[in-house]
Image (cartoon, grey):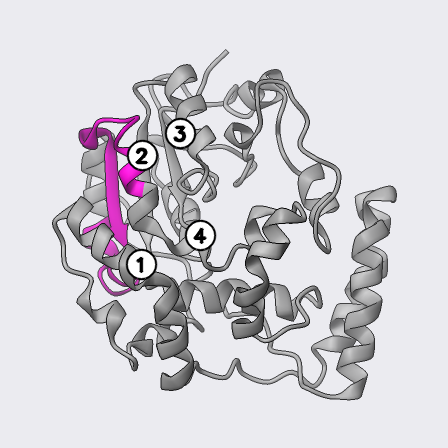
C-alpha cells in the first residue's frame, strides 16, 4: 500500500489548511482526502487517549491511527503522483519525528512558521470562538503547564506550539536539512505564487501551475456578556460528553448553540502592545534559538507592535 512522499508538518494556525487546499489543485500532487489524519502522533496501531480538555475526546476520535486506514488514504493516488498530507502537530511532536523517520525516511517535510504571538492568539481565538476556552489569552498561557499535566490535547498548548527553534533543532537531529523546507506565513500570504513555486521545486513537480492560496474569513468573536457565558457553559458541558454520541447527532446539537453564540459576535480585537510585550517573554529565547538554527533573522517578531500580521487574520485560514 502507498505511503506519503511529503508531509506538511506545522505549525497549527500558520496557514496549513490553505496550503493543503492550494496543493490539492496541482495536477501532479495527490493530497490525502482527510486533511489532518495525525497518524504519526500515535504509536503504531495504538489508539489515541480518550480524555483531555474540553472537546478533546471528540478530536481524538478523528485520528487515523491504524496503519491500514492511513495507507488507504493514498490508495486513489494516480500513478506517478507525489502524495502528501497535512498534520500540523508533527513539527511539535518529537516522537512523531522518529515515527516518520522510521516509516518514511525519505519523506520531504514542509514547515510554515508564523509570528508565535500571533499564532498563539489565533489558536486561543479558535477555541474561544468554539465556546471551549473561557479564559483570556494571558491567563490561559499561565495555566498551560497545568493543562499539560492534566493531559489536555496539543491544541491547547498556545506557547509550546510556537517554540519553533526547539522544534526545528530537534527535527534536524532526525532528518537532514535538505529534506525540510521552512516557509514563513507572511510570505505564504503576501507572495503565494513565489512560495508555491518554491514548494513545487522542493517536491519535484512543475512550477507555475498553482499560484493562489484560498482565502477564508476568521471565526466570529463572541461578545463578553451573560448570555454568551451561559451558551459557552452549555457548549463546554456538551464537549465533555459529545464523544458518546454519533458525529451527526453531535453536530445537530452543537450547530444551533454555536449559531446563538455567534449571533452578536464582532470582529476579533487586535492584540495590544502591552499584551504582546507580556507574551514575548514566552518566546524571546526561542526566537534567538530559531535564528541560530536557521541562520535567518526573525527580528520583527520581537517588537511590541509587530501585530502587522494581525491584518492577515481575516483573509487566511489557519
Towards the viewer: 261 or 26 = 261
Q: Earlier in the sequence, mark 4 or mark 2?
A: 4
Inspect this view and state whether residue 61 appears: yes
Q: Which mark is residue 171?
A: 2
Sequence-wise, the earlier of marks 2 and 1 is 2
Q: Nearer the viewer, residue 209 or 173?
A: 173
Mark 3 or mark 2: name the one nearer the start of the chain. Answer: 3
Residue shown at 45% from the left, 53% from the top: 160
Q: Secondary structure at mark 2?
A: helix
Q: Which residue is mark 3?
A: 97
List the residue tagged with mark 1.
Answer: 185
The answer to whether marks 3 and 2 mark residues whose Cβ atoms lie closer than 8 Å is: yes
* Residue that extends furthest to the left in the rendered view of this protein: 295
Q: Residues within 10 Å of mark 4 (few under 14, many from 20)?
A: many
Is 314 contained in the magenta span?
Answer: no
* Range shown magenta: 168-195
* Tag 4 residue: 161
Q: Relative to residue 307, is residue 194 drawn left or right?
A: left
Q: Earlier in the sequence, mark 3 or mark 4?
A: 3
Q: Look at the numbered disc 1 and give the secondary structure of its residue.
A: helix
Between residues 36 and 278, which one lies in front from this camera angle? 278
Mark closer to the chain start, 1 or 4: 4
For disc 2, the neighbor class at 10 Å (few under 14, some 14 to 19, many from 20) is many
How many marks can you see?
4
Q: CA distance from mark 3 to mark 2?
A: 6 Å
Residue at (28, 59) in percent of width and height: 285
**Whole-percent x and y of residue 302?**
25, 71
The tag earlier along the polypeptide, 1 or 3, is: 3
Tell me which residue sits at (74%, 76%) in the image. Answer: 261
Q: Secondary structure under badge 3? A: helix
Amino acid at each position: 500500500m502507498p505511503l506519503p512522499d511529503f508531509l506538511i508538518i506545522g505549525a497549527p494556525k500558520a496557514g496549513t489548511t490553505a496550503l493543503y487546499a492550494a496543493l490539492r489543485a496541482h495536477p501532479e500532487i495527490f493530497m490525502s482526502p482527510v486533511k489532518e489524519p495525525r497518524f504519526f502522533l500515535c504509536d503504531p496501531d495504538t489508539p489515541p487517549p480518550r480524555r483531555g480538555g474540553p472537546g478533546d475526546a471528540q478530536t481524538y476520535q478523528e485520528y487515523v491511527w491504524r496503519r491500514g486506514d492511513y495507507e488507504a488514504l493514498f490508495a486513489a493516488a494516480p500513478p506517478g503522483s507525489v502524495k502528501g498530507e497535512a498534520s500540523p502537530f508533527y513539527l511539535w511532536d518529537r516522537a512523531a519525528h522518529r515515527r516518520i523517520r522510521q516509516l518514511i525516511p525519505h519523506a520531504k517535510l514542509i514547515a510554515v512558521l508564523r509570528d508565535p504571538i500571533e499564532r498563539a492568539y489565533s489558536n486561543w481565538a479558535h477555541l474561544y470562538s468554539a465556546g471551549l476556552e473561557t479564559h483570556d489569552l494571558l491567563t490561559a498561557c499561565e495555566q498551560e503547564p497545568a493543562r499539560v499535566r492534566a493531559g489536555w490535547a496539543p491544541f491547547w498548548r498556545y506557547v509550546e506550539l510556537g517554540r519553533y527553534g526547539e522544534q526545528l533543532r530537534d527535527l534536524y537531529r532526525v532528518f537532514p536539512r535538505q529534506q525540510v523546507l521552512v516557509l514563513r506565513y507572511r510570505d505564504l500570504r503576501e507572495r503565494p505564487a513565489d512560495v508555491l513555486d518554491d514548494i513545487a521545486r522542493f517536491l519535484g513537480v512543475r512550477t507555475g501551475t498553482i499560484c493562489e492560496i484560498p482565502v477564508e474569513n476568521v471565526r466570529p468573536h463572541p461578545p463578553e456578556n451573560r448570555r454568551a457565558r451561559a451558551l459557552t457553559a452549555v457548549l463546554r458541558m456538551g464537549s465533555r460528553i459529545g464523544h458518546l454520541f454519533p458525529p451527526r447527532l453531535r453536530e445537530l446539537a452543537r450547530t444551533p448553540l454555536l449559531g446563538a453564540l455567534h449571533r452578536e459576535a464582532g470582529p476579533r480585537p487586535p492584540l495590544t502592545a502591552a499584551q504582546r510585550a507580556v507574551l514575548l517573554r514566552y518566546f524571546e529565547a526561542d526566537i534567538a534559538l530559531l535564528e541560530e538554527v536557521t541562520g535567518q533573522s526573525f527580528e520583527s517578531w520581537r517588537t511590541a507592535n509587530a501585530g502587522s500580521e494581525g491584518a492577515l487574520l481575516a483573509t487566511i485560514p489557519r
